[in-house]
Image (spheres, rainbow, N blue to C red):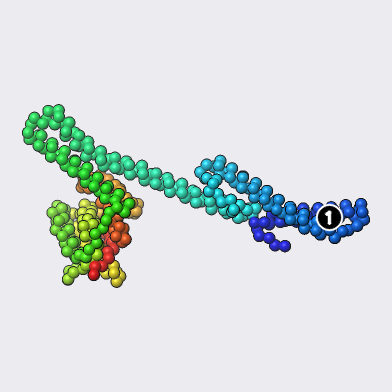
Protein backbone atom coordinates (compact mmCIF):
# COMPACT_ATOMS: atom_id res chain seq x y z
CA UNK A 1 0.00 0.00 0.00
CA UNK A 2 1.25 3.50 -0.91
CA UNK A 3 0.35 6.47 1.30
CA UNK A 4 0.79 10.18 0.98
CA UNK A 5 3.93 11.42 2.72
CA UNK A 6 1.67 13.20 5.17
CA UNK A 7 0.37 9.82 6.46
CA UNK A 8 3.39 7.67 5.73
CA UNK A 9 4.76 7.51 9.27
CA UNK A 10 1.39 6.81 10.91
CA UNK A 11 0.42 4.22 8.26
CA UNK A 12 3.70 2.32 8.51
CA UNK A 13 3.63 2.27 12.30
CA UNK A 14 -0.06 1.26 12.36
CA UNK A 15 0.65 -1.56 9.93
CA UNK A 16 3.41 -2.90 12.15
CA UNK A 17 1.21 -2.64 15.26
CA UNK A 18 -1.70 -4.36 13.48
CA UNK A 19 0.54 -7.17 12.18
CA UNK A 20 2.14 -7.74 15.56
CA UNK A 21 -1.24 -7.69 17.34
CA UNK A 22 -2.83 -10.06 14.81
CA UNK A 23 0.06 -12.52 14.98
CA UNK A 24 -0.01 -12.40 18.78
CA UNK A 25 -3.78 -12.94 18.77
CA UNK A 26 -3.43 -15.83 16.30
CA UNK A 27 -0.75 -17.55 18.39
CA UNK A 28 -2.87 -17.03 21.51
CA UNK A 29 -5.98 -18.58 19.89
CA UNK A 30 -4.00 -21.50 18.45
CA UNK A 31 -2.23 -22.38 21.68
CA UNK A 32 -5.31 -22.15 23.87
CA UNK A 33 -8.12 -23.16 21.57
CA UNK A 34 -6.18 -24.76 18.72
CA UNK A 35 -8.15 -22.77 16.14
CA UNK A 36 -7.37 -20.15 13.55
CA UNK A 37 -10.42 -17.93 13.07
CA UNK A 38 -11.25 -15.77 10.02
CA UNK A 39 -12.02 -13.08 12.58
CA UNK A 40 -8.29 -12.43 12.67
CA UNK A 41 -8.59 -10.55 9.35
CA UNK A 42 -11.29 -8.33 10.84
CA UNK A 43 -9.14 -7.86 13.94
CA UNK A 44 -6.19 -6.86 11.71
CA UNK A 45 -8.24 -4.23 9.82
CA UNK A 46 -9.73 -2.75 13.01
CA UNK A 47 -6.32 -2.67 14.73
CA UNK A 48 -4.77 -0.96 11.74
CA UNK A 49 -7.49 1.70 11.45
CA UNK A 50 -7.61 2.50 15.16
CA UNK A 51 -3.82 2.69 15.41
CA UNK A 52 -3.60 4.84 12.30
CA UNK A 53 -6.12 7.49 13.42
CA UNK A 54 -4.82 7.64 16.99
CA UNK A 55 -1.19 7.95 15.88
CA UNK A 56 -1.92 10.52 13.18
CA UNK A 57 -3.90 12.70 15.58
CA UNK A 58 -1.41 12.44 18.43
CA UNK A 59 1.65 13.07 16.25
CA UNK A 60 0.10 16.10 14.57
CA UNK A 61 -0.93 17.46 17.97
CA UNK A 62 2.52 16.82 19.40
CA UNK A 63 4.35 18.48 16.48
CA UNK A 64 2.00 21.47 16.44
CA UNK A 65 2.46 22.09 20.17
CA UNK A 66 6.23 21.78 19.89
CA UNK A 67 6.42 24.14 16.90
CA UNK A 68 4.10 26.56 18.67
CA UNK A 69 6.42 26.55 21.67
CA UNK A 70 9.43 27.18 19.40
CA UNK A 71 7.64 30.17 17.84
CA UNK A 72 6.79 31.50 21.29
CA UNK A 73 10.36 31.11 22.51
CA UNK A 74 11.83 32.77 19.43
CA UNK A 75 9.36 35.66 19.92
CA UNK A 76 9.99 37.08 16.48
CA UNK A 77 7.20 34.89 15.19
CA UNK A 78 3.53 34.78 16.07
CA UNK A 79 2.23 31.27 16.72
CA UNK A 80 -1.26 32.39 15.68
CA UNK A 81 0.07 32.93 12.17
CA UNK A 82 1.18 29.33 11.86
CA UNK A 83 -1.39 27.47 9.74
CA UNK A 84 -2.54 24.45 11.77
CA UNK A 85 -3.87 22.51 8.72
CA UNK A 86 -0.39 22.49 7.20
CA UNK A 87 1.08 20.52 10.13
CA UNK A 88 2.14 17.14 8.83
CA UNK A 89 4.02 14.08 10.01
CA UNK A 90 6.15 14.29 6.87
CA UNK A 91 9.26 15.97 8.31
CA UNK A 92 10.49 17.08 4.89
CA UNK A 93 7.27 19.00 4.23
CA UNK A 94 7.25 20.29 7.81
CA UNK A 95 10.84 21.54 7.58
CA UNK A 96 10.14 23.23 4.27
CA UNK A 97 7.02 24.91 5.68
CA UNK A 98 8.84 26.21 8.76
CA UNK A 99 11.78 27.45 6.66
CA UNK A 100 9.40 29.26 4.31
CA UNK A 101 7.55 30.84 7.22
CA UNK A 102 10.76 31.92 8.96
CA UNK A 103 12.09 33.33 5.66
CA UNK A 104 8.95 35.45 5.22
CA UNK A 105 9.15 36.73 8.80
CA UNK A 106 12.85 37.47 8.45
CA UNK A 107 12.14 39.53 5.33
CA UNK A 108 9.40 41.42 7.19
CA UNK A 109 11.80 42.20 10.04
CA UNK A 110 14.50 43.38 7.63
CA UNK A 111 11.94 45.60 5.89
CA UNK A 112 10.87 47.07 9.24
CA UNK A 113 14.51 47.73 10.14
CA UNK A 114 15.06 49.52 6.82
CA UNK A 115 11.95 51.62 7.39
CA UNK A 116 13.04 52.41 10.94
CA UNK A 117 16.48 53.51 9.73
CA UNK A 118 14.85 55.60 7.01
CA UNK A 119 12.51 57.17 9.59
CA UNK A 120 15.43 58.05 11.87
CA UNK A 121 17.42 59.51 8.98
CA UNK A 122 14.39 61.46 7.76
CA UNK A 123 13.73 62.90 11.21
CA UNK A 124 17.37 63.88 11.52
CA UNK A 125 17.34 65.54 8.09
CA UNK A 126 14.13 67.48 8.63
CA UNK A 127 15.36 68.56 12.07
CA UNK A 128 18.56 69.91 10.49
CA UNK A 129 16.74 71.62 7.63
CA UNK A 130 14.32 73.41 9.97
CA UNK A 131 16.87 74.12 12.69
CA UNK A 132 19.21 76.16 10.49
CA UNK A 133 16.73 78.87 9.39
CA UNK A 134 15.02 78.87 12.79
CA UNK A 135 18.26 79.56 14.62
CA UNK A 136 19.15 82.19 12.03
CA UNK A 137 15.84 84.02 12.56
CA UNK A 138 16.15 83.65 16.33
CA UNK A 139 19.70 85.03 16.29
CA UNK A 140 18.77 88.18 14.39
CA UNK A 141 15.66 88.80 16.52
CA UNK A 142 17.56 88.36 19.80
CA UNK A 143 20.30 90.70 18.54
CA UNK A 144 17.67 93.32 17.74
CA UNK A 145 16.01 92.89 21.14
CA UNK A 146 19.38 93.29 22.85
CA UNK A 147 19.64 96.83 21.52
CA UNK A 148 20.59 96.64 17.88
CA UNK A 149 17.10 97.75 16.86
CA UNK A 150 18.00 101.29 17.91
CA UNK A 151 20.28 101.54 14.88
CA UNK A 152 17.97 102.00 11.89
CA UNK A 153 20.41 100.57 9.33
CA UNK A 154 21.22 97.49 11.43
CA UNK A 155 17.53 96.98 12.21
CA UNK A 156 16.55 96.96 8.54
CA UNK A 157 19.43 94.65 7.55
CA UNK A 158 18.70 92.15 10.33
CA UNK A 159 14.97 92.16 9.66
CA UNK A 160 15.65 91.47 5.97
CA UNK A 161 17.92 88.54 6.87
CA UNK A 162 15.35 87.20 9.35
CA UNK A 163 12.72 87.49 6.62
CA UNK A 164 14.87 85.33 4.32
CA UNK A 165 15.08 82.69 7.06
CA UNK A 166 11.28 82.72 7.40
CA UNK A 167 10.92 82.44 3.61
CA UNK A 168 13.16 79.37 3.64
CA UNK A 169 11.03 77.79 6.38
CA UNK A 170 7.87 78.47 4.37
CA UNK A 171 9.55 77.01 1.27
CA UNK A 172 10.44 73.77 3.10
CA UNK A 173 6.98 73.44 4.67
CA UNK A 174 5.23 74.01 1.33
CA UNK A 175 7.36 71.33 -0.30
CA UNK A 176 6.64 68.91 2.55
CA UNK A 177 2.93 69.67 2.28
CA UNK A 178 3.01 68.97 -1.46
CA UNK A 179 4.82 65.64 -1.00
CA UNK A 180 2.30 64.62 1.67
CA UNK A 181 -0.60 65.42 -0.66
CA UNK A 182 1.04 63.51 -3.50
CA UNK A 183 1.68 60.46 -1.31
CA UNK A 184 -1.88 60.25 -0.01
CA UNK A 185 -3.42 61.15 -3.36
CA UNK A 186 -4.75 64.46 -2.09
CA UNK A 187 -3.30 66.59 -4.89
CA UNK A 188 -5.79 67.11 -7.72
CA UNK A 189 -4.20 67.26 -11.16
CA UNK A 190 -5.75 69.62 -13.70
CA UNK A 191 -4.80 68.04 -16.99
CA UNK A 192 -4.87 70.06 -20.19
CA UNK A 193 -3.21 70.14 -23.60
CA UNK A 194 -0.21 72.43 -23.95
CA UNK A 195 2.96 72.84 -26.00
CA UNK A 196 5.85 71.27 -24.08
CA UNK A 197 8.42 73.14 -26.21
CA UNK A 198 7.00 76.51 -25.15
CA UNK A 199 7.09 75.44 -21.53
CA UNK A 200 10.75 74.36 -21.75
CA UNK A 201 11.66 77.69 -23.33
CA UNK A 202 9.82 79.57 -20.58
CA UNK A 203 11.81 77.66 -17.95
CA UNK A 204 15.02 78.45 -19.83
CA UNK A 205 14.12 82.15 -19.77
CA UNK A 206 13.35 82.07 -16.03
CA UNK A 207 16.64 80.35 -15.18
CA UNK A 208 18.82 82.19 -17.68
CA UNK A 209 20.40 84.48 -15.08
CA UNK A 210 21.07 81.59 -12.69
CA UNK A 211 22.78 79.65 -15.49
CA UNK A 212 24.75 82.72 -16.56
CA UNK A 213 26.57 82.82 -13.21
CA UNK A 214 28.35 79.60 -14.21
CA UNK A 215 28.18 80.34 -17.95
CA UNK A 216 26.01 77.27 -18.50
CA UNK A 217 24.12 77.11 -21.82
CA UNK A 218 20.44 76.09 -21.71
CA UNK A 219 19.62 74.57 -25.09
CA UNK A 220 17.43 72.12 -27.00
CA UNK A 221 19.13 69.09 -28.56
CA UNK A 222 17.94 70.22 -32.00
CA UNK A 223 15.70 72.75 -33.71
CA UNK A 224 12.04 71.85 -33.33
CA UNK A 225 9.36 72.98 -35.76
CA UNK A 226 5.69 73.32 -34.92
CA UNK A 227 4.13 72.24 -31.63
CA UNK A 228 4.51 69.12 -29.49
CA UNK A 229 1.38 68.81 -27.39
CA UNK A 230 1.15 66.90 -24.11
CA UNK A 231 -1.81 66.24 -21.85
CA UNK A 232 -0.77 66.87 -18.24
CA UNK A 233 -1.07 69.28 -15.34
CA UNK A 234 0.71 72.30 -16.78
CA UNK A 235 1.74 73.85 -13.46
CA UNK A 236 3.11 70.59 -12.05
CA UNK A 237 5.06 69.63 -15.16
CA UNK A 238 6.59 73.11 -15.20
CA UNK A 239 7.67 72.45 -11.61
CA UNK A 240 9.22 69.14 -12.69
CA UNK A 241 11.19 70.80 -15.50
CA UNK A 242 12.26 73.70 -13.26
CA UNK A 243 13.55 71.37 -10.54
CA UNK A 244 15.46 69.18 -13.00
CA UNK A 245 17.03 72.14 -14.82
CA UNK A 246 17.87 73.91 -11.55
CA UNK A 247 19.64 70.75 -10.40
CA UNK A 248 21.57 70.53 -13.67
CA UNK A 249 22.75 74.12 -13.13
CA UNK A 250 23.50 73.56 -9.44
CA UNK A 251 25.70 70.53 -10.14
CA UNK A 252 26.85 71.64 -13.58
CA UNK A 253 30.42 72.58 -14.31
CA UNK A 254 31.63 76.02 -15.34
CA UNK A 255 30.99 76.70 -19.05
CA UNK A 256 28.83 73.58 -19.21
CA UNK A 257 25.61 72.75 -21.02
CA UNK A 258 22.10 71.69 -20.03
CA UNK A 259 20.24 70.11 -22.93
CA UNK A 260 16.54 69.24 -23.21
CA UNK A 261 15.12 66.86 -25.80
CA UNK A 262 11.60 65.62 -26.54
CA UNK A 263 11.22 62.24 -28.25
CA UNK A 264 8.37 60.05 -29.47
CA UNK A 265 8.54 56.60 -27.86
CA UNK A 266 5.08 55.13 -28.53
CA UNK A 267 1.86 56.11 -30.24
CA UNK A 268 0.64 58.05 -27.22
CA UNK A 269 3.81 58.66 -25.17
CA UNK A 270 6.66 61.17 -25.22
CA UNK A 271 9.98 61.11 -23.41
CA UNK A 272 11.44 64.38 -22.09
CA UNK A 273 15.19 64.29 -21.36
CA UNK A 274 17.21 66.77 -19.31
CA UNK A 275 20.93 66.12 -19.84
CA UNK A 276 23.97 67.90 -18.43
CA UNK A 277 27.75 67.44 -18.50
CA UNK A 278 28.25 68.29 -14.83
CA UNK A 279 29.54 66.46 -11.78
CA UNK A 280 27.53 63.27 -12.24
CA UNK A 281 26.28 60.99 -9.47
CA UNK A 282 28.00 57.95 -7.99
CA UNK A 283 26.27 54.55 -8.06
CA UNK A 284 25.72 54.43 -4.30
CA UNK A 285 23.95 57.81 -4.39
CA UNK A 286 22.04 57.12 -7.59
CA UNK A 287 19.55 54.79 -5.89
CA UNK A 288 18.70 57.30 -3.17
CA UNK A 289 18.49 60.64 -4.92
CA UNK A 290 14.68 60.64 -4.97
CA UNK A 291 14.48 60.30 -1.18
CA UNK A 292 13.28 63.28 0.83
CA UNK A 293 16.16 65.46 2.05
CA UNK A 294 18.77 63.12 0.60
CA UNK A 295 21.71 65.14 -0.69
CA UNK A 296 24.55 63.91 -2.87
CA UNK A 297 26.85 66.73 -1.80
CA UNK A 298 25.61 67.67 1.65
CA UNK A 299 27.78 70.74 2.00
CA UNK A 300 27.72 72.04 -1.55
CA UNK A 301 24.00 71.66 -2.03
CA UNK A 302 23.26 73.70 1.04
CA UNK A 303 25.41 76.52 -0.24
CA UNK A 304 23.35 76.44 -3.40
CA UNK A 305 20.12 76.56 -1.40
CA UNK A 306 16.97 74.52 -1.93
CA UNK A 307 14.89 72.44 0.44
CA UNK A 308 16.42 69.06 -0.41
CA UNK A 309 12.96 67.95 -1.57
CA UNK A 310 13.16 68.87 -5.25
CA UNK A 311 13.82 65.43 -6.77
CA UNK A 312 11.39 63.76 -4.37
CA UNK A 313 8.67 66.16 -5.55
CA UNK A 314 9.63 65.52 -9.17
CA UNK A 315 9.24 61.76 -8.72
CA UNK A 316 5.89 62.10 -6.94
CA UNK A 317 4.47 64.49 -9.55
CA UNK A 318 5.52 62.23 -12.44
CA UNK A 319 4.09 59.15 -10.71
CA UNK A 320 0.88 61.05 -9.89
CA UNK A 321 0.45 61.32 -13.68
CA UNK A 322 0.91 57.51 -13.88
CA UNK A 323 4.16 58.09 -15.73
CA UNK A 324 7.75 56.93 -15.21
CA UNK A 325 10.95 58.80 -14.39
CA UNK A 326 14.46 57.51 -15.11
CA UNK A 327 17.98 58.61 -14.25
CA UNK A 328 21.35 57.72 -15.71
CA UNK A 329 24.61 59.21 -14.50
CA UNK A 330 28.36 58.73 -14.47
CA UNK A 331 30.56 60.42 -11.93
CA UNK A 332 32.60 63.20 -13.55
CA UNK A 333 30.75 62.92 -16.88
CA UNK A 334 27.21 64.09 -16.28
CA UNK A 335 23.60 63.07 -15.63
CA UNK A 336 20.42 62.52 -17.59
CA UNK A 337 16.93 62.64 -16.08
CA UNK A 338 14.04 61.59 -18.31
CA UNK A 339 10.31 61.14 -17.79
CA UNK A 340 7.36 60.09 -19.90
CA UNK A 341 4.30 62.17 -20.71
CA UNK A 342 1.01 61.46 -22.44
CA UNK A 343 0.65 63.05 -25.87
CA UNK A 344 -1.95 65.72 -26.30
CA UNK A 345 -4.70 65.63 -28.93
Which residue has dot 1 on it?
Answer: 23
Q: Which quarter of the figure is the N terminus placed in?
A: bottom right
Label 1: how many residues lie within 10 Å, few (<14), some (14-19) or many (20+)? some
Point out the residue furthest to the left here: 152
Instruction: Name the image quarter holding residue 169.
Output: top left
Residue 296 lies, in percent from the top left, at 29, 49
The reply to whether residue 267 is in sight is yes
Point 59% across, 42% down: residue: 69
Residue 261 lies, in percent from the top left, at 23, 65
Circle 1 SS class: helix
Residue 21 lies, in percent from the top left, at 81, 53
- How many numbered discs, if any? 1
The answer to whether 256 appears left or right of 312 in the picture is left
The answer to whether 195 appears left or right of 12 in the picture is left
Point 92% across, 56% down: residue: 34
Instruction: Name the image quarter holding residue 239.
Output: bottom left
Point 70% across, 62% down: residue: 2
Q: Which quarter of the figure is the C terminus placed in?
A: bottom left
Query: Which of these two is toward me, 312 or 300?
Result: 312
Amino acid sequence: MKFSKKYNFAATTSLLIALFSTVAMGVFLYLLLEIISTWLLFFFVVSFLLSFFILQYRIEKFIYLRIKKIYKDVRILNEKDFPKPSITTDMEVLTREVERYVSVKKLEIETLNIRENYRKEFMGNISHELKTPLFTVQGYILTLLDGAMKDKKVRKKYLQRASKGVERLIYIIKDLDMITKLEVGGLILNKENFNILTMVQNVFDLLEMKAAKKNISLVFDKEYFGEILVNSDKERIEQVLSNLIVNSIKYGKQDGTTEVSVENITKNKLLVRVTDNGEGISKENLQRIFERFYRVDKSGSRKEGGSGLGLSIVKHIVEAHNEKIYVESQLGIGSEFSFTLEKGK
